[in-house]
Image: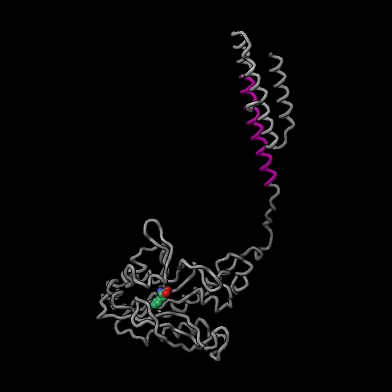
Amino acid sequence: MNEQINELKVQLDSQLSQVSTTQELEGIRVAFLGKNGSITELLKKMGGLSPEEKKSFGQAVNVLKGYATQAIAAKVEELNKIELEKELNALPEIDLSAPTHLVKGSYHPITLVQRHCENVFRTMGFNIEDYSEVVTDYECFEALNIPKFHPARDMQDTYYLENGQLLKSHTSAAQNAIYKKYKDDLINEGRPIRAIFPGRCFRNESTDACHENTFFQMEGVMVDKNISISNLIFFMKTMLSEVFQRDLKVRLRPGFFPFVEPGFELDISCAICGGEGCPSCKHSGWLELCPCGMIHPNVLKEGGIDPDEYTGFAFGLGLTRLAMMKYGVKDIRDLNSGNLTSLDQFTDDK
Ligand code: PHE
């Protein structure tokens, strides 16, 4: 009996010394310690032995079992180490002396357009504000004169969190917080509110070449005494002429947004054909670029500003749209793709 035990130990040692993969090792484990493995079989043979024999034989088999378990575990560790080393050696070595321009990143086209617009507005005295992407229903809708069940909500279906918060569907969601932040400066010190707030927006939309569920806007507001539509037109014309670096014509058409009254769609003369008419402007000579309007009295009131004393304008510039026009991007999905080959080519600043 003891010979059998010794023989098994010798077999195990010899097989373990030759094994080179974890798969083979698992085969050995099953052959010795598995349900029908040779060590397990030995224990099954104990039935016909006298009580004394049973005791000493049982002990000896258990010692072998413990030895096998440990030896196999040690081998697993050893093989894992070897396999990891092999994987690491297969990785390409990093050459620290390689020229750095080969690995340098580039700015995203939307970042470039956003920074350009920010600079233009900064020179006109606007503050640049950052705002959260997760907002409340109040910020995104109620404070903007869009009560629950208002049909205007259908246009801005978005993604909701379990706690009732949502991913903002437009940068207008920051308006209320901006009014509250600056209203004291306006009322007590007569300092007009001038702020822009660029940001990522989300809408629950099926995507195609012109629609994305994630895109960028840049909101702007100005509030003071006697602000009128002429101020709005002046600011928009100056800003867009700077962005496109040419003198653009603008026109306003009526547009409906519950948080502005009156509301407009602002068009610019087509930058591609100069207003003659071409496929990009559907032969009209005009491109729809920026919804805007005079801030609705209810929205000012909700922000703590008296609409009888102060007026203001707001606009929502589509940054993604602007980047597409500026760089001639045909498919909006390229911008979120993370595909560096397609993103790199629009970038003039690396
Ligand atoms: N928030 C509106 C939208 O995304 C755009 C807008 C902004 C309209 C400001 C008017 C004034 O559809």
Which quadrant does the C terminus fall into?
Answer: bottom right
Q: Nearer the viewer, residue 36 or 171?
A: 36
Up-down: is 69 above or below 229? above
Report x, y in % for residue 129: 41, 70
Up-down: is 182 above or below 96? below
Majority secondary structure of the magenta segment?
Answer: helix
Report x, y in % for residue 216: 48, 70
Report x, y in % for residue 333: 56, 69
User: Is residue 78 on the magenta stretch?
Assistant: yes
Which quadrant does the N terminus fall into?
Answer: top right
Report x, y in % for residue 170: 42, 70
Residue pushed farthest bottom? Answer: 276
User: Is residue 317 on the magenta stretch?
Assistant: no
Asked whether residue 260 is in view, the answer is: yes
Residue for point 40% across, 62% down? 166
Up-down: is 279 above or below 306? below
Give residue 167's quadrant in the image: bottom left
**Displayed-image quarter of ligand 1:** bottom left
> Is residue 328 left or right of 1 when viewed as pictured?
left
How many numbered marks does the figure carry? 0
Give residue 189's quadrant in the image: bottom left
Residue for point 55% across, 89% down? 277
| Color encoding of the figure | one colour
> Is residue 70 left or right of 3 when viewed as pictured?
left
For the magenta stretch, what is the residue range? 62-87
Asked whether residue 219 is in view, the answer is: no
Q: Nearer the viewer, residue 116 or 345?
A: 345
